[in-house]
Amino acid sequence: MRTDDTRRWLALGALALAMLTIGLDVTVLTVAIPTLAVELDANISALQWFSSAYTLALAALMLPAGALGDRFGRKKGLLAALVLFGLASLACAFADSAGQLIAARVVLGIAAAALIPLSMAVLPVLFTDPAQRQRAVTIWVTATALGLPLGPVVGGWLLQHYWWGSVFLINVPLVILGAVAVAALVPESRGETGLRVDGLGAALSATGMLGLTYGFIRIGERSWGDPGAWSVIAASVVLLGAFLWWQRRSSHPLIDLALFAAPGFRWGTALSLVVSFAMFGMFFTLPQYLQAVLGVDALGSGLRLLPLIGGLVVGSRLVDLLLPRLGARVVLTAGFLVLACGVGLGALTRVDSGFGLTALWTTVLGAGMGVVMPAAMGLALGELTTARSGSGSALLQAIRQAGGTIGVAVLGTVLATAYRSDLGELNRPPISDGVNAAVAATADDPAALARVQHAFVFGMDTMLGVCAVGCLIAAVVVAVGLERRPVAGQTAADTAESMHAG
């Protein structure tokens, strides 16, 4: 379907606005977590679920949402998802308990699971010329990336001047503008053939991931020896095994398991998981450290995340230059070493370290992420044929989101366990529930407050140390096991496209 140039670019603007909204929503929560912990009386488990509920829904439902759009119409799906996103944002803004906010975050994740793949699927319909299509994809990706640094800053400013619900309410006018523009400018499109949706596969994968995440969060609440938690984890592993078994036999599977026969796809997927594991854990921890230990307000916390974004920009520029010259093995090994240095420096944090060390290690961490993420995704996508590029990129994105969900659960558990072990006689509710509640409870007792801050920093250092070891192991495995070959023709921009494709 063809439209005139003005209409096409205006339609792209509508899609970019929708992606900007999603980018804002991903990171705005990072600066709101400490406030939500106090206002909604949320413990560490609830804080983990604020993030995990969104990413779990996103990872579990992205593949079936794309198939539904192909079958019933991408424009209809986009409009429905935008309306749902706006309504869920309202529900988040006016939630009066942690449970209500978690439920609303699930709905937000469902809406985002449709918005990401369907908005990308519309671009080839709007732009048939390859050069214009690449430019359109760059704008689409940039809009999403722009929301990431804007989220903490905008969220911090709103928290400083208004009540916490405003960080979600800001989505509503953006969603309204996006929906009106999509309705007026985006043409309807469908796949050439109506695709059946693997309902059983979607149910098995979603239920398995939900149980796995809950099991690790329960371990964080209780202990590593909790039999109920391990029972849930074991049942979830069985469900995920049944999902893989069903995918081999289904006539319309959610995922193409044959993709994992390609070495590049296996390597790229596994390495992307390692990066997501560390990234989501860092986003969960750092704002709490900035506010509970350094004592900055929400806006200051958002502004202090900007060095991470600066590092990401530098890393993304470097990988575009180095990957064609040095190849994937060298670039990925170096990138993981930079990541290990970044989180390793973070593990040296002390209560009196100040922001200088934090700015240094988050900048280094961002640079490592900017190198590893595009290179790993490019390695996987280099194995995809044109016929499998859509389903393959969607599978990569879903796995990446799932890895982030597990990362928050596992690393949050490590943090909580170390934090409580260092509290000593203070290891009792509400202090043991989390650092934010503990700071509020010990505000009038300087000695107890100092112990709480020390315990949290100890927990954060332990968590970052685990991440550093993981990155070092990944660097060694890549250097030894990955065959020497360049990623021909794969640029950072190309990879950024694939990271968000659905």
Image (tube, rainbow, N blue to C red):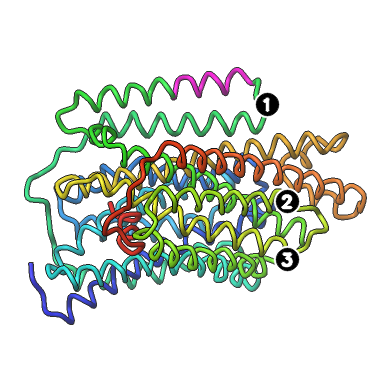
Q: Which residue in the protein does label 1 denote?
A: 223
Q: Give how far apart the Cα atoms at labels 1 and 3 are.
A: 35 Å
Between the C-alphas of marks 2 and 3, the distance is 23 Å
Q: Amino acid at mark 2?
A: Asn
Q: Nearer the viewer, residue 234 or 329?
A: 329
Determine which residue is flagged by label 3. 356
Q: Nearer the viewer, mark 2 or mark 1?
A: 1
Specify which label sits upstream in the sequence, 1 or 3: 1
Query: Can residue 254 be seen by looking at this rendering?
Result: no
Q: Position of residue 172 (x, y in %)?
A: 42, 67
Q: Position of residue 156 (x, y in %)?
A: 61, 68
Drawn side of residue 308 relative to residue 322, left or right: right
Q: Amino acid at mark 1?
A: Ser
Image point (44%, 69%), residue name: 146
Task: Tell which of 124 and 278 is nearer to you.
Answer: 278
Q: Label 2 belongs to which residue?
A: 436
> Is mark 2 in CB contact (under 8 Å) with mark 3?
no
- Element type where label 1 sits in the image: loop
Q: What residue lies at 39% left-to-right and 53% top-to-bottom?
A: 375
